Image (spheres, rainbow, N blue to C red):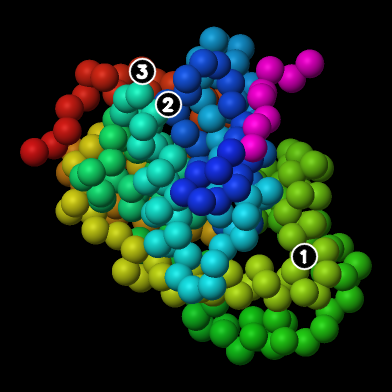
Amino acid sequence: MSSIRVSLRTVGGVRTRVLSVGRRPRVVLLHGFGDSADTWRGVLADFAERGLAAMAVDLPGFGEADDLAPGPILPQLDAFLADLVTGRGGPVVLVGNSMGGTAALRAAQNPGLPLAGVVSIAAPGLHDSWMLRALDTNALPVWLYSALPVPAVAVRTVASAVIPRILYARPGSACPDTVARFADLVRDDQSTKALLVKGRTLLSELRDAYRPQDIRCPLTVVVGRKDKLVATQSGKRLHAEVPHSELRVLDDCGHCPQLDDPAGTADLIADFASGARERTLVS
């Protein structure tokens, strides 16, 4: 029987799903764009074996959470996280991958939130990357793809082949369930168009998403050397702009270290969380 508990909660007015292990978890795991809390199941299982506590949530618009309201995406994630971390009985450690890393960094910019620290993994928008260029310089092909009907079977077939190459450092090790979960996002023409609209909206917001000078809580910046979506230079730039931060470069990981190496990622998070009490805010 799985030790991961699944529950439904309302956070900031958003009905969402929470996966958790242990009692009163203060380590909160945030997924990336198009992903869900399920991406953290390997890390949660590792935490459960160690007797540690953590929780992962479906962010608004993804997984089983309520959909996003029309308009900018990041302010909605800001409001959701502010409600999530407030009133948890003590400071919270936020761990975010990709879009979740962006959301965690934005929370760190808010001095009013009770954060013990942040682990940001492959947050986009801090440096030029393939993902940003694909939607900026190839805007017309992307628009045509979203505007023209494409057979669902064809889209899913292509997606199932491409997803492991994009997300994993070693495509051959991709979990079939994870690939199927991502492929389901483009199960038909309508869902594909909706996902592309969300993606372009989010990417347009990344240009003004960060204020590194306002981050005062402990921060570890994580980059995968084999990341095909976000350049490792992005994490290096963030580390340079937040002098008190720590940089971790994972040689054998891609965009989602929690998928490539759940145990190693769990180690990194657990070490950071265990030292959070000894760390102090930067004045």
Residue denoted by label 3: 274
**Above or below 231: residue 192:** below
Helix, strand or loop status at disc 2: loop
Q: Measure how far apart labels 3 and 2 are at the Cα level.
A: 11 Å
Comparing labels 2 and 1, the label whose residue is closer to the camera: 2
Mark 2 or mark 1, which has the lower sequence index?
Answer: 2
> Is the residue marked by circle 3 packed among few (<14), some (14-19), or many (20+) residues within 10 Å?
few
Residue 16: which quarter of the image? top right
Q: Where is residue 123 in the image (x, y as percent from the top left)?
A: 43, 53
Res. 278 mark: none
- Residue, x 62% and y 60% (percent of image)? 67
Horizontal side of residue 39 vs 136, given as left or right:
right
Label at residue 186: 1
Asked whether, in this view, residue 181 is left or right of residue 127, the answer is right
The amino acid type of the residue labelled 2 equals Arg
Contact? badges 3 and 2 (CB < 8 Å): no
Residue at figure coordinates x 86%, y 63% from the top left: 157
Residue 84 in sight here: yes
Type of the residue with mark 3? Ser
Looking at the rendered image, the quarter that the N terminus falls into is top right
Picture quadrant where residue 268 is located: top left
The range drawn in magenta is 1-8
Assess whether residue 257 is covered by the magenta stretch: no
Which residue is drawn at the image coordinates 77% and 87% (left, top)? 148
Say the numbered circle drawn on residue 26: 2
Determine if the magenta segment contains residue 5: yes
Label 1 sits on a secondary structure element that is helix
> Which one is earlier in the sequence, the residue at label 3 or at label 2?
2
User: Where 216 falls versus 227 (above or below)?
Assistant: above
In terms of sequence position, does the residue under pointer 1 or pointer 3 come before the other?
A: 1
Question: What percent of the width, then of the height, locates residue 136?
Answer: 50, 80
